[in-house]
Amino acid sequence: MRWRAGAVVSATGTWRRPYWPRYPGRFGGRQLHTVSYRRPEPFAGQRVLVVGGGNSAAQILAEVSTVAKTSWATLRPPRLLPDEVDGRVLFDVASRRQAAVAAGRGDDRGAAALGEIVMVPSVRAARERGVLVARPMFTRLVPEGVVWPDDTLGRFDTIIWCTGFRPDLGHLDPLGLSTVQGVPATVGTRSVDEPRLHLLGYGDWTGTASATIIGAARTAKACVAQLTAALAA
């Protein structure tokens, strides 16, 4: 089936294509991504390595560490938000960031400047148990587990990759769009190469915080205003 339109909005989101980083070697145990994790009980009694420095990694580590022996590997030292910062505070910070960017006052990075991991009750409990301790990323995989930067062997039964997602943009491949850092070049939400195409909700490169609830709503309004003006012309 073929459709004709004066404009197209691509809004396939950022949570449909799990990202698995590549490391030398091969691991002989079980590996899974955040998207496949459901509950901690299947890992009871195991040695589990959690990989990633964001909220998913911290929360999965907190759960699995109650039934298994866990380790945590991150590219950079994890940045924990203050205990008192909750969703309401993050919403307010994101709102101020977007207003500042729109007014040309610069980008203070919003909540990212405060930290990256929200200290929900389970994560605070993990910190109190002493399991919320990260070590630098391993250098390679081996059948028994991983090799750490100091060449010591880490033995594991399971690796859980909490390494995020990438935008699902395969449907745009036939357009041959130019890219910047691996994503289509845009001005706001509009494609640089195809002005009738808008990309909505993929992150800061398509509008400040556009992959969040507050950011998606505001960039959507701007996108619709542009589309309405363009179609009317």
Image (cartoon, grey):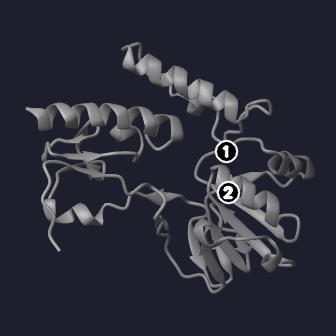
Q: Which residue is mark 1?
A: 78
- Closer to the camera in the image, 171 or 40: 171
Q: Is residue 155 above or below residue 205?
A: below
Instruction: Name the kind of residue labelled 2 in the image.
Output: Ala
Quadrant (top left/top right/bottom left/bottom right) for the N terminus: bottom left
- For the residue carrying disc 2, how many other residues have a C-alpha within 10 Å: few (<14), some (14-19), or many (20+)? many
Is residue 81 left or right of 100 when viewed as pictured?
Answer: right
Quadrant (top left/top right/bottom left/bottom right) for the C terminus: top left
Q: Which residue is mark 2?
A: 57
Residue at 29% x, 36% y: name it.
223
Q: Is residue 211 above or below residue 41?
A: above
User: Residue 194 location, x and y as percent?
Assistant: 13, 47
Q: Is residue 10 above or below residue 188?
A: below
Is residue 120 left or right of 114 when viewed as pictured?
Answer: right
Q: Is residue 203 above or below residue 142?
A: above
Residue at 26% x, 31% y: name it.
225
The alpha-carbon separation of the residues under discs 1 and 2 comes to: 10 Å
User: Residue 11 location, x and y as percent?
Assistant: 35, 52
- For the residue carrying disc 1, how many other residues have a C-alpha within 10 Å: few (<14), some (14-19), or many (20+)? many
Is residue 110 left or right of 88 when viewed as pictured?
Answer: left
User: Residue 117 location, x and y as percent?
Assistant: 68, 43
The image quarter in which residue 222 lies: top left
Is there any visible trace of residue 207 in the rendered image? no
Say whether marks 1 and 2 touch (CB < 8 Å).
yes
Comes first in the chain, label 1 or label 2: 2
Instruction: Name the kind of residue labelled 1 in the image.
Output: Pro
Is there any visible trace of residue 12 in the rendered image? yes
Tell me, for residue 66, which label it has, or none: none
Which element type, helix, strand or loop, lies under badge 1? loop
Which element type, helix, strand or loop, lies under badge 2? helix
Residue at 35% x, 40% y: name it.
205
Furthest residue toward front:
232
